[in-house]
């Protein structure tokens, strides 16, 4: 096997491994949405209390993003990802053992802390292994894995819970995560040069240009706008991971399995959007349109999401409402690949730190979404106000992208 073929094959394997990580991460995360009805009944939890459960995860996930990214930069994605996957897998199993609201909230908050470093570490692995012209597709594949994992998790977990109960389902998921962690540690290496039989040469110099110190990076040109637009994206999207399934079940009188199938539809749209967006990002980049490769998919995505959310606010039938929200999900997911590749452009060797900061901002948006949705629904007896607020945020995100200069630290040569 030639060096070139070896590099290409191993890069594909790394992307596939990160896809599986993303898939597993989200399956573990959304299982609780499918279990919400049974857990509320067995543990005596109200809708507002369960909103705190969802919010506890989002808060913990947000709090540890920057520390998680810093640790991924310092220790490398091999050891760091192994440690956190073991941690959150144990906590997934522990979710099946809880006996009250306080313990459940504490477990899910800690679970959020444990999962927080997953995507910053995956971003650092992408930076280490891939050249700038390849990273858009890689990020698209990564986030397609999260959407497919969520779709599978909502539908598959609903069936598993119906058959085995929610406690056993969480324990089984925890065991799967431990197997993944062992396989990752045995196979992955932090840099291509650490793999036997491959030359220890640096990647494209464009991917290694030193960024500013990380303490200044968060205030550098474009970084604050990146963080703000990711807040808006997650505010819209997090409904898929939290309240969409129970809302459809209650609002339209569906069974858990039926609601799980409907709730999975936006996630398939999201997977398609991530694949498309990643391809567009890399195609434009290879043509020399560095800034446009990041801005164009993101701005178009937020504009599409805004229109779809406005339409969703007026839909009454379950099919049309889910379709409109699926289009909105497609729109906001078009923004993910450009967001993460722009972080790599700006951050370089501090990729874990900046992607962690951006993901923190996004998950503060998730936290606000998880708390706001049930209260708005209770206050207005409709999801309309939530859709309108999300639409306004997406318009603001378009203006944020106009301030982003993602090619600031990437030479055009």
Image: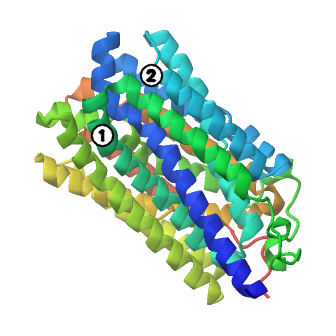
- Is residue 355 visible to us here? no
Comes first in the chain, label 2 or label 1: 2
Left-right relation of 121 to 100 = right
Disc 1 on helix, strand or loop?
A: helix
Closer to us: 321 or 378: 321
Location of residue 345 by image quarter:
bottom right
Q: Nearer the viewer, residue 398 or 15?
A: 15
Separation of marks 2 and 1 at Cα, in angstroms: 22 Å
Residue at 48% across, 23% down: 95
Residue drawn at the location 44% of the way across and 22% of the way down: 96
**Residue 32 at x, y percent in the picture:** 40, 31
Q: Quadrant of the C terminus?
A: bottom right
- The N terminus lies in quadrant: bottom right
Which residue bears the numbered disc 2?
A: 96
Q: Position of residue 60 (x, y in %)?
A: 60, 29
Residue that numbered label 1 is attached to:
244
> Residue 159: where, in percent of width, then height?
26, 38
Q: Residues within 10 Å of mark 1 (few under 14, many from 20)?
A: many
Q: Residues at badges 2 and 1 in contact (C-beta under 8 Å)?
A: no
Q: Is residue 158 above or below residue 96?
A: below
Camera-side mark, 2 or 1:
2
- Give the residue drawn at x 48%, y 17%: 104
Answer left or right for 398 relative to 402: left
Using the rendered image of the protein, determine whether residue 227 is visible from the camera's viewpoint.
yes
């Amino acid at each position: 096997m030639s060096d070139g073929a070896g590099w290409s094959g191993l890069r594909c394997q790394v992307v596939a491994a990160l896809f599986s990580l993303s898939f597993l991460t989200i399956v573990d995360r959304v299982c609780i949405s499918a279990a919400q009805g049974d857990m509320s009944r067995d543990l005596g939890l109200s809708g507002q209390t369960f909103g705190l459960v969802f919010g506890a995860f989002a808060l913990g996930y947000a709090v540890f993003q920057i520390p998680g990214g810093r640790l991924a930069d310092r220790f490398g994605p091999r050891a760091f990802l192994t440690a956190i996957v073991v941690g959150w897998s144990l906590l997934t199993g522990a979710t099946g053992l809880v006996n009250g609201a306080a313990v459940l909230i504490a477990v899910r908050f800690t679970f959020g802390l444990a999962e927080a470093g997953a995507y910053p570490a995956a971003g650092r692995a992408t930076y280490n292994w891939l050249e700038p012209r390849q990273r858009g597709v890689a990020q698209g594949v990564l986030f397609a894995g999260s959407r497919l994992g969520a779709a599978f998790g909502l539908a598959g977990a609903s069936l598993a819970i119906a058959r085995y109960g929610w406690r056993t389902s969480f324990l089984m998921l925890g065991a799967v995560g431990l197997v993944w962690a062992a396989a990752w540690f045995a196979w992955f290496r932090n840099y291509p040069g650490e793999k036997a039989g491959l030359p220890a040469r640096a990647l494209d110099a464009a991917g290694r240009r030193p960024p500013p110190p990380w303490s200044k990076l968060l205030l550098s040109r474009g970084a604050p706008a990146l963080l703000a637009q990711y807040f808006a994206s997650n505010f819209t999207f997090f409904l898929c991971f939290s309240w969409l399934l129970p809302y459809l079940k209650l609002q339209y009188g569906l069974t858990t399995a039926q609601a799980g199938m409907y709730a999975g539809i936006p996630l398939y749209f999201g997977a398609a959007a991530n694949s498309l967006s990643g391809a567009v990002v890399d195609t434009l980049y290879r043509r020399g349109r560095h800034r446009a490769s990041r801005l164009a998919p993101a701005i178009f995505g937020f504009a599409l999401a805004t229109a779809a959310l406005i339409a969703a606010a007026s839909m009454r039938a379950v099919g049309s409402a889910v379709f409109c929200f699926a289009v909105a999900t497609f729109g906001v997911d078009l923004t993910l690949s450009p967001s993460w590749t722009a972080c790599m452009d700006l951050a370089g060797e501090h990729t874990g730190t900046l992607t962690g900061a951006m993901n923190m901002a996004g998950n503060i948006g998730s936290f606000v979404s998880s708390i706001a949705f049930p209260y708005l629904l209770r206050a207005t007896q409709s999801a309309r106000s939530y859709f309108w607020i999300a639409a306004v945020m997406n318009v603001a995100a378009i203006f944020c992208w106009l301030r982003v200069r993602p090619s600031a630290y990437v030479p055009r040569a």
